[in-house]
Image (spheres, helix red, strand yellow):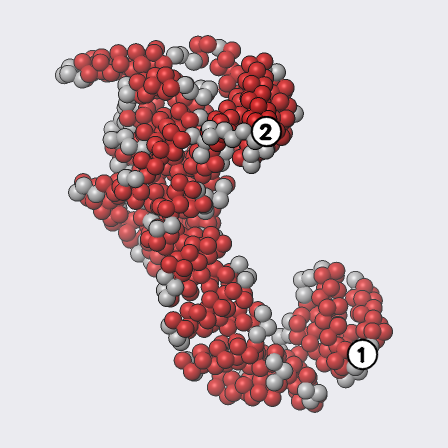
């Protein structure tokens, strides 16, 4: 078996246990255990199956056991535990994935995995010594020792990260040991440990690890609690079904979610995750719209630099360059995206993750802090130490931790004369940054927490997309992220204010099915809300559910009549289902609101034409020409209406105008139909051939299009044989010209 097969088997066992098909689950479990040949697991499974057979025997004999439900619940828990252990043992022996390759390496080399007691002692001793050294006034003398101690702390915290990540499911005593060591960690180490719990739990469920993570959601440090809350949200989506087998976890989660402050943060984190999931839309907008304007700025700066004696630029220099409207608008849009929490730097910094620093998995999750030994050594160099980089980067409100490290590491590759400009222009003096810092200094904890979770989500996104072995990890951003379907969270995300925010976010990100689901629920709660009804209708329209959309637009119109946007969308949906009578009524209502609108008048004519009321349609198009002048826009439908009425002489006049102007493939095609109606088959074939020549279609596609149109020519009295002859004649004509 390969990894895909064993994973599918493991998942199938889960499903069988969930559906209470225990006999089939036992058979599948025996097969799974055989793959790893674990005698201990065979014994545990045999004991469970024996107990189950006894339960079946007593039940069939009419004996009612009041503890039956509890027995089955315990049995399910044990079977799931056996399945997890068998799966892990097989993967550890045979899986090529990064996680299990690392497990095998750690198993072979005991020095790679120091025990918790050693980690705790290293941390405690180093912190004590650092505390003593901090009292010394001779920084020059103590700096080397301080750096050495910081290295020890960083290494010990990396070991703690790995210990969590690669540990087997914990027992209660093990959990307490991890908690005890956690207390000795620095803030960056504690924050980093949250990610280790996330990755470990994504790999395999562990009741005690998840319990520890829930406890961290109430940590006093926002850097820890907000990361933990984000991780918990993602894990509940993955392990929702598993929770019902863990009563103690359910109780702990229920108590945790009872806190109003925490409950209010979850919808905000949900919205941030949605923004990140659809980050490619932002990247595309940047590449297609904003970056071309930014490149103009870069070129202007370069040009000015080459023509100037200045080594650096001040703000006034840049203001002169960005004063034109297009560039100013682009920069304003970029600024707006930043303040909305969008991840605008992913495309930029994705190119800067090749440094050796990012080969270590824990470095993708370590918060940016000035005492990090990698930075202390880097910026202690003479050519970098006076730039104030660490102060500027630490203060950046828009760069996530991973990108901050990328920026610093990349600075070493930049020519020395450009470094000061890069640092000074990072944007630490931007208006948004100052506002953010002022609000934080004024005690706006909500904003601070929102920033922490948002930037952490940026870090997660980079890991799942850019880590060298990212394909070996469970990428949360490839899942639906429909958290409102998670049972323990149902009450939180079905609150009207949360649903309204999330529905708007889904709509903004073009996720119409999820948005429609939420708007439908909001309409049940507030049936007279115009905005919900209108948004629901739009979602249905974008999903091409035109009948549902038309009905929803009708409901919106009943709530607030004569809203032009609603009438236009409703009319469009009616046309998509060939309800031209209703569409005509709507366009006439629109004309009553805006009698000079050209599009409405043309749409009225189009509806009349589809309803075969050709006289009324022609009159409408003549009215259009009276007010707005003749053009191809009216000649085309007029010529078709006259043709359908059999008024060939008048139609010929209209077709002549079209042919003398700038005909396209459809014009030649319609003219060919006009020739067919007059039995001028040779001219018709010539027109059809021209239609092909001016088109960009392949022969096969054009023939399919033509044959589809051909079936409608029976209105001119052609039989099947004549249609076939016409089709073959055209094909010979086209091939002769090749």
Q: Is residue 436 above or below residue 621?
A: above
Quadrant into which the C terminus falls? bottom right
Q: Position of residue 509 (x, y in %)?
A: 44, 52
**What is the number of callouts on the image?**
2
46 to 425, vertically: above or below:
above
- Of labels 1 and 2, the one closer to you: 2
Q: Which residue is mark 1?
A: 718
Judge the density around disc 2: few (<14), some (14-19), many (≥20) Cα neighbours within 10 Å: few
Find residue 61 and name its label: 2
**Badge 2 element:** loop
x, y percent for residue 168: 46, 19
Report the disc number at residue 45.
none
- Relative placement, left or right, of 143 versus 585 is left
Q: Residue at x 57, y 76 (%)?
A: 580
Residue 207 visible in image: yes
Residues 145 and 65: in front is 65
Query: Considering depth in this image, is 31 or 63 the residue closer to the camera?
Result: 63
Report the quarter where the N terminus lies.
top right
| Residue 37 x, y percent position in the rendering | 61, 16
Q: Residue at x 48, y 36 (%)?
A: 241
Residue 309 placement: quadrant: top left
């Amino acid at each position: 078996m390969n990894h895909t097969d064993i994973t599918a088997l493991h998942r199938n066992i889960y499903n069988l246990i969930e559906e209470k098909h225990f006999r089939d689950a036992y058979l599948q479990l025996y097969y799974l255990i055989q793959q790893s040949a674990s005698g201990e697991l065979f014994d545990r499974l045999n004991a469970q199956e024996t107990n189950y057979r006894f339960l079946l025997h007593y039940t069939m004999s009419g004996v009612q056991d009041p503890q039956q439900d509890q027995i089955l619940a315990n049995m399910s828990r044990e079977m799931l535990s056996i399945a997890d252990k068998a799966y892990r043992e097989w993967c550890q022996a045979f899986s090529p994935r990064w996680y299990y390759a690392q497990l095998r390496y750690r198993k072979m080399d005991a020095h790679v995995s120091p025990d918790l007691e050693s980690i705790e002692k290293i941390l405690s001793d180093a912190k004590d010594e650092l505390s003593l050294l901090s009292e010394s006034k001779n920084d020059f003398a103590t700096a080397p020792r301080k750096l050495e101690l910081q290295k020890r702390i960083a290494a010990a915290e990396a070991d703690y990260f790995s210990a969590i990540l690669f540990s087997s499911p914990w027992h209660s005593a093990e959990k307490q040991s991890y908690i005890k060591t956690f207390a000795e960690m620095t803030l960056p180490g504690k924050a980093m440990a949250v990610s280790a719990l996330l990755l470990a739990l994504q790999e395999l469920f562990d009741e005690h690890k998840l319990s520890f993570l829930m406890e961290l959601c109430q940590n006093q440090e926002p850097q820890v609690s907000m990361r933990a809350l984000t991780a918990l949200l993602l894990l509940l989506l993955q392990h929702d079904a598993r929770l019902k087998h863990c009563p103690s976890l359910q109780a702990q989660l229920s108590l945790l979610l009872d806190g109003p402050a925490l409950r209010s943060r979850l919808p905000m984190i949900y919205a941030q995750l949605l923004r990140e999931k659809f980050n490619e839309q932002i990247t595309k907008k940047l590449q297609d719209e904003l970056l071309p304007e930014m490149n103009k700025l870069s070129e202007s700066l370069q040009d000015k630099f080459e023509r100037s004696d200045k080594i650096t630029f001040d703000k006034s220099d840049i203001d002169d360059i960005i004063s034109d409207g297009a560039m100013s608008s682009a920069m304003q849009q970029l600024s707006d995206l930043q303040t909305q929490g969008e991840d605008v730097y992913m495309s930029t910094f994705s190119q800067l993750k090749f440094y050796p620093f990012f080969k270590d998995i824990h470095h993708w999750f370590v918060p940016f802090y000035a005492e990090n030994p990698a930075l202390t050594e880097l910026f202690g160099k003479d050519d970098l130490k006076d730039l104030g980089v660490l102060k500027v980067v630490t203060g950046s409100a828009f760069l996530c931790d991973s990108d901050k490290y990328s920026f610093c590491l990349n600075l070493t590759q930049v020519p020395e004369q450009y470094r000061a400009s890069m640092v000074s222009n990072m944007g630490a003096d931007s208006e948004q940054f100052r506002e953010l810092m002022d609000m934080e200094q004024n005690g706006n904890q909500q904003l601070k927490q929102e920033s922490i979770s948002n930037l952490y989500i940026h870090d997660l996104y980079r890991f799942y997309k850019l880590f060298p072995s990212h394909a070996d990890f469970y990428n949360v951003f490839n899942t639906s992220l429909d958290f409102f379907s998670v049972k323990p969270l149902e009450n939180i995300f079905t609150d009207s204010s949360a649903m309204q925010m999330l529905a708007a976010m889904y709509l903004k990100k073009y996720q119409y099915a999820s948005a429609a689901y939420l708007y439908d629920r909001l309409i049940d709660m507030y049936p007279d809300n115009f905005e919900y009804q209108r948004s629901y209708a739009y979602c249905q329209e974008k999903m091409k559910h035109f009948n549902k959309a038309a009905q929803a637009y009708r409901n919106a119109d009943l709530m607030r009549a004569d809203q032009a946007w609603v009438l236009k969308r409703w009319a469009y949906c009616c046309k998509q289902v060939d309800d031209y009578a209703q569409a005509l009524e709507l366009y006439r209502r629109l004309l009553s609101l805006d009698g000079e609108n050209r599009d409405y008048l043309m749409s009225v004519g189009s509806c009349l034409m589809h309803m075969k009321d050709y006289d009324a349609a022609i009159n409408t198009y003549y009215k259009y020409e009276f007010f707005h002048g003749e053009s191809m826009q009216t000649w085309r439908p007029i010529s078709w209406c006259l043709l359908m009425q059999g008024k060939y002489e008048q139609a010929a006049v209209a077709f002549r105008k079209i042919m003398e102007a700038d005909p396209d493939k459809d014009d030649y095609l319609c003219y060919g139909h006009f020739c067919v109606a007059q039995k001028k088959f040779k001219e018709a074939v010539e027109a059809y051939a021209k239609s092909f020549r001016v088109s960009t279609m392949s022969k096969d596609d054009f023939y399919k299009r033509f044959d589809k149109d051909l079936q409608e020519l029976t209105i001119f009295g052609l039989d099947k044989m004549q249609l076939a002859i016409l089709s073959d004649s055209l094909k010979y004509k086209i091939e002769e010209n090749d």
